[in-house]
Amino acid sequence: MLTLDELKENYVNPILQNTGIPFSVFTDTGDFEKAVRDGNTVTEYVNGIFSVTSSSIENQGTDKEIVSISTELKFIVRVNDDPNADGSFENVTQFREKLSAAFGAVPPRFSIIGKDGKTYAVVAGYTLPAPGTREQRSMLGDSFTYSCQIYFAYLKNSLNVGDISVTIDGQSVPFLAIGITRRPSVMAALFSNSTNGESKAYAENAALTIDLTIPAFVADSVDICTDYIFGISDANATHNVVVTFGSGAGAKTLQRTMIFGESSTGGQGLETAMYTVSLIPYAVPDNGG
């Protein structure tokens, strides 16, 4: 299992370094790191605490644990002595902006080789820095707090949804959910001595279906969904669909000529409109020639 320090070293620290602000972050607790003077240069650290707020661990067998961890990252920022003309404090305002930009620039998936030598595929999500309280604090003076939540989920040597990619006619599809299903057409035959209706089954054929949930972005790969649903494109218009399942040497690729099946779009309130799309393999009709 990954430790809190490993998550801090591999995810939190690289993000904070990209802000250009000197940080001193401790896990759970630590000593306050005061400003340091080097000649005429004073380095004033933003102190922070990185701690676990909740966790969930499900054991799925030997060496297979599904782990979800919620953490809090809390900072204390010293308020400048002189406010701007509008009464705001530039360093406090810039702190939130720089922190938000740094978190937003990091991919939500990353890999960690833990101290146990195992590779973990980790998915992370975060909340924007939320304001806290302004107080006069010991050793720091007038200061303000910010906090944000970071959520981690990982399973050792596992495949994450982010490791699955779909393209339609060469355009990447930004799906939120995916389902790849093979549905057999079954022929059943009762056992000759059956007394309870039990039967054996034989699959005459099997049909592949790819089901996607896609936000209604304005993009080439999404516009074709609208064209199909609105009847602008032909119902049998074919598309080159490529699904890559996994990454690296173990990745599997599915490539088919497909058409749209049952598909819809809609939404409600202030939510983003969504497409629910099915793709099915296209069979060239036999005209009996």
Image (cartoon, rainbow, N blue to C red):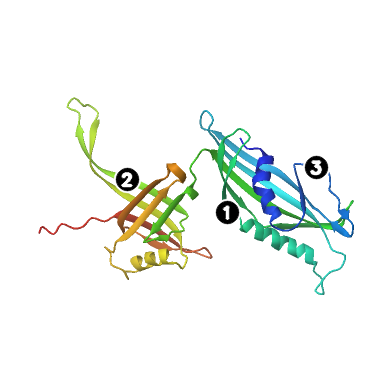
User: Does 263 sit left or right of 33 as displayed?
Assistant: left
Q: Which residue is mark 1?
A: 107
- Labels 1, 2: front one: 1
Q: Is tag 3's residue or tag 2's residue first in the polypeptide sequence?
A: 3
Name which residue lies at 47% across and 65% down: 217
Q: Is tag 3's residue or tag 1's residue first in the polypeptide sequence?
A: 3
Q: Which residue is mark 3?
A: 30
Name which residue lies at 41% across and 50% down: 244
User: Does 41 sit left or right of 149 as displayed?
Assistant: right
Indicate the position of residue 6 as horizontal and vertical percent values.
66, 41
Q: Nearer the viewer, residue 266 or 212?
A: 212
Q: Nearer the viewer, residue 196 or 91?
A: 91
Image quarter where the C terminus lies is: bottom left
Q: Which residue is mark 2?
A: 182
Indicate the position of residue 150 as horizontal and vertical percent values.
64, 49
Crowd band around label 3 with a 10 angstrom C-alpha radius: few (<14), some (14–19), many (20+): few
- Using the rendered view, name the quadrant where residue 288 is placed: bottom left
Q: CA distance from mark 1 to mark 2?
A: 32 Å
Image quarter where the N terminus lies is: top right
Q: Going by the picture, which residue comes out furthest to the top?
A: 193
Labelled disc at residue 148: none
Q: Is residue 68 above or below residue 107?
A: above
Q: CA distance from mark 3 to mark 2?
A: 55 Å
Residue type, numbered disc 1: Pro
Q: Is tag 1's residue or tag 2's residue first in the polypeptide sequence?
A: 1
Q: Is residue 159 above or below residue 261?
A: above
User: Does 219 sit left or right of 185 as displayed?
Assistant: right
